[in-house]
Structure formats: structure tokens, C-alpha cells
Amino acid sequence: MEVAPVTNQVIQRDRHAEFLAALAILGACLEKIATEIRALQRTDIREVEEPFGEGQRGSSAMPHKKNPEISERVCGLARLLRGHLVPALENIALWHERDISHSSVERVIIPDSCITLDYMLDKMCWVLDGLRVFPERMKKNLAATRGLVFSQTVLTALVEKGMEREAAYPLVQKNCMKVWEDSSELLDLLLCDTDVRTFLSEEIRACSDLAPLLSHMDTIFARAGL
């Protein structure tokens, strides 16, 4: 928000729109995080959980529930920030570049957007600092797929062993469909599939190893300065 290099009596409002766009985008990023927390806190998933203090109430009707109320609040306020951006864009066009129809709007949207985003940042920092994570629940959810989450790993392994991808895909897919239809384990089906065994043997078991999928985790966190 520096001094404009060129202006007339009324400063051009594109800089204000750009400022409010930055606030709206940052708010949308917070909403993205909050939405993921809300999804992962669902009773049937429950891989993470917002901080929940002793005596705090969740659902007004169901005492067992711990609602992600702060994340829900952040999602709602992100919509408000995006709503403030629209009049900021409308303010760019001025009659003869000097009418003051914009100022009445800006007295509301600029301070309100700044205060709203400050509140959202404060609340999301609180949520993330106290976020509860349940690794065992994550493993249980992965196991519930009966190996389907490793279908891509198997497909890649077949291709690396020399099988054409166009042949490997339907082969793996055929076994995956059996898993959907009954209680079979994907890796057990693959071990019994003679076409798969032509290219893979005990490597099939290795396809369910999570370690390679986590091997670059520290590098990714390092890029984020963590």
C-alpha cells in the first residue's frame, strides 16, 4: 500500500482490490486446511481432532460428538472474505476516474476483512497447535480397503518388471473388482493370479509396505521450513 506513482484527485482502486484479493486468497487457504480437518474428524474417519477441553460441549443433541466448530467457523468466514472482494473489484471502475461511490464501501470491507482474517489466523493457529492425530486410526482405515490402496504400487511394479502398462492395468483392475465384491484381500488375490505371478512373486507383499511412500516426508517438511 505505497504511494501511487501516478494518480489524479482520486487514487485508482485496483491496488485496494489486489490487497483484498490477497486477504481472500489467504482466507481460502485457511478454509482448505479447516475443511480437511472437518472431514478427518468425522465419526466414521476420526483420524484427527480439534482441541477439546474438559467440560466443553460438542453437539447440542448428541453428547458423544466432538464437533470441529472452530474449523467450521473459519470456513464460514472465508466466504465472507470472498464476498468482500467482489465490491472491491466493482470499485475499480469510477465515473470519469473521480467519483466517490467507492469510499462508503471501503469503510466497511477493508477494516472488516483485516479484522476477520486476523481472527481466522489466530483461531487456526490454536487448532493446529493443539490438533490431536490418531496414527492407529489411519492404519485401521487403510486396512479397511483390504489392500485396494496399493493397486497403483502393484501396477507400477508390474510395468517395472517388463509388463506393458495397457496389459497390467486391466489385470490389476480385475482383481480389485473382486475385492469390492467380496471380502478378499487384494494381495492374496494377486498371489493366486498366474498372470501376475509371471512377473511378480514375493514382490507382491512388498507392494503393501508403507515405508517407500513415507521416505521423502522429511524432505517435504524441510521445504516448508519445519
Image (cartoon, rainbow, N blue to C red):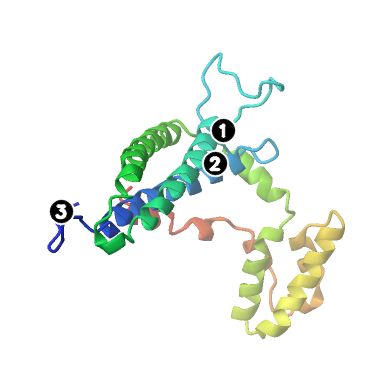
Per the image, label 3 sits on a secondary structure element best described as loop
- On screen, residue 101 versus residue 158, left or right, reads left
Residue 58 quadrant: top right
Eyeballing the image, is 226 above or below 93? Answer: above
Q: CA distance from mark 3 to mark 1?
A: 40 Å
CB atoms of marks 2 and 1 within 8 Å: yes
Q: Which mark is residue 2?
A: 3
Between residue 133 and residue 16, name the one nearer to us: 16
Q: Is residue 132 visible?
A: no
Q: CA distance from mark 2 to mark 1?
A: 8 Å
Q: Amino acid at mark 2?
A: Ile
Per the image, label 1 sits on a secondary structure element best described as loop
Q: Position of residue 173 (x, y in %)?
A: 76, 71
Q: Which mark is residue 37?
A: 2
Q: CA distance from mark 2 to mark 3?
A: 37 Å
Q: Amino acid at mark 3?
A: Glu
N-terminal of the pair, mark 2 or mark 1, is 2
Q: Residue at x 13, y 54 (%)?
A: 3
Question: Can you identify the residue that label 1 sits on?
Answer: 68
N-terminal of the pair, mark 2 or mark 3, is 3
- Callout 1: 10 Å neighbours few (<14), some, many (20+)? many
Q: Residue at x 31, y 57 (%)?
A: 18
Q: Amino acid at mark 1?
A: Pro
Between residue 104 and residue 17, name the one nearer to us: 104
- On screen, residue 25 versus residue 4, left or right, reads right
